[in-house]
Image: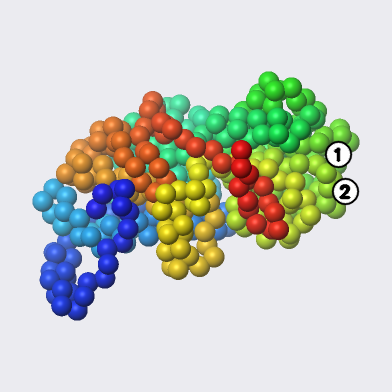
């Protein structure tokens, strides 16, 4: 099945069911990994990624793909890294030991970076549909690829909008000290200052915190009109509630893709301050993707209410990996890896080709706000 189609095969009719079952029965099982947090505060985002991979794998298997002269059935190995770097490396080693031939993951930069070293040692190609830290490929692993924009692109885009369009002048930085949070904060600071904004406060938290009153009180004292939050929605939700509690109802909260989820209104308990959020995601919104509306309809039918942000990119990453295998006529990582590096195809998320160090050649960035407790794309 060409990647540009990316549709499930229709169910076999009763007349053809017997014929269809023959190649399926003879299929060679090939392990295919997905590694994300499916427990803890990031579980809802990780499950969205896992759902996207599962959906793609089931569609591909339904076509009974023949690679290397054998009918292949991909077996999904779904692992929970709990959003913890140590567990991510343990999961990566497990997938190596299980002879996974590809991995979609991980979710955060702080888990993807250490796991990537393990996959590189094992020679397993890996595509992250979510991790954005620019340092991700500093080590130069030829097994690691990214299917979305990095923080240099995200931070610059959201800073441009916040300063030039939303009028941000006095900015406070607040990050969760993760690789993602620190990276986004650094890029945003440089971009915002270059456009004339002033950074008036710098505060820190953790990716497990739920109380931000001390940091917010310090920021309020500096009369900031905008807060750049480098962190995830699990912290941004209570932060928005506490901003309202402190009367910071006119202060913008600017953030990256880890905050920019469908679940943020629920996590913020629909606080009025939600209307002051400006956030950026790597990639186009599902509604703007060619075939995106149909894909989302199929996704929702199977996983009702679970779509967050990265499901479509995880789905596309799965197809990209399998397309490279088909091109190489092999599921052996060392054989299909060169085809993956040189791939030039179009799928659900648009054109896919990679440049230096596994970066996507033409990444898109989308800016969102929240209106009526719904994430809404800002037309630019």
CB under 8 Å between discs 2 and 1: yes
Q: Which of 22 and 163 is in front in this view?
A: 163
Q: Is residue 288 left or right of residue 263?
A: left
- Residue shown at 18%/65% (left/top)? 24
Q: In this view, does 147 lie to the left or right of 133?
A: left
Gap between marks 2 and 1 measured at Cα: 9 Å
Residue 271 against residue 221 in the figure, above or below: below
Circle on res. 220: 1
Circle on res. 235: none
The quadrant in which residue 139 appears is top left
* Residue wearing tag 2: 247
Residue sticking out furthest to the bottom:
14
Residue sticking out furthest to the front:
379
Name the secondary structure under disc 2.
loop
x then y, percent, for residue 137? 44, 30
- Residue shown at 42%/58% (left/top)? 295
Q: Nearer the viewer, residue 183 or 80?
A: 183
Confirm whether residue 348 shows in the render. Answer: yes
Confirm whether residue 314 shows in the render. Answer: no
């Amino acid at each position: 099945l060409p990647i540009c189609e990316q549709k499930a095969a229709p169910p076999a009719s009763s007349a053809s069911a017997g014929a269809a079952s023959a190649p399926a029965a003879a299929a060679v099982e090939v392990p295919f990994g997905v590694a994300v947090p499916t427990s803890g505060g990031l579980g809802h985002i990780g499950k969205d990624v896992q759902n996207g991979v599962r959906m793609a794998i089931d569609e591909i298997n339904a076509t009974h793909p023949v690679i290397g002269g054998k009918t292949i059935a991909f077996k999904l190995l779904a692992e929970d890294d709990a959003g913890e770097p140590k567990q991510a490396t343990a999961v990566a080693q497990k997938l190596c030991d299980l002879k996974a031939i590809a991995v979609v993951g991980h979710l955060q930069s702080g888990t993807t970076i250490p796991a990537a070293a393990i996959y590189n040692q094992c020679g397993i190609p890996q595509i992250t549909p979510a991790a954005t830290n620019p340092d991700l490929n500093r080590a130069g692993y030829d097994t690691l690829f990214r299917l979305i924009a990095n923080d240099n692109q995200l931070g610059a885009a959201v800073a441009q909008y916040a300063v030039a369009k939303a009028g941000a002048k006095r900015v406070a930085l607040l990050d969760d000290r993760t690789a993602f949070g620190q990276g986004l904060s650094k890029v945003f600071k440089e971009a915002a200052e270059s456009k004339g904004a002033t950074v008036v406060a710098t505060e820190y938290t953790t990716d497990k915190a739920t109380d931000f009153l001390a940091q917010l009180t310090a920021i309020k004292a500096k009369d900031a009109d905008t807060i750049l939050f480098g962190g995830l929605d699990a912290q941004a939700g209570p932060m928005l509630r506490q901003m309202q509690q402190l009367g910071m109802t006119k202060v913008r909260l600017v953030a990256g893709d880890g905050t920019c989820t469908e679940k943020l209104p629920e996590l913020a308990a629909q606080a009025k301050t939600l209307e002051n959020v400006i956030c950026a995601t790597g990639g186009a919104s599902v509604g703007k993707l060619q075939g995106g509306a149909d894909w989302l309809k199929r996704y929702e039918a199977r996983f009702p209410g679970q779509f967050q942000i990265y499901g479509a990119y995880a789905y596309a990453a799965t197809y990209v990996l399998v397309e490279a295998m088909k091109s190489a006529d092999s599921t052996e990582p060392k054989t299909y890896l060169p085809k993956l590096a040189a791939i030039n195809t179009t799928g659900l998320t648009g054109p896919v080709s990679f440049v230096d160090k596994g970066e996507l050649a033409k990444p898109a960035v989308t800016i969102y706000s929240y209106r009526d407790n719904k994430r809404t794309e800002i037309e630019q």
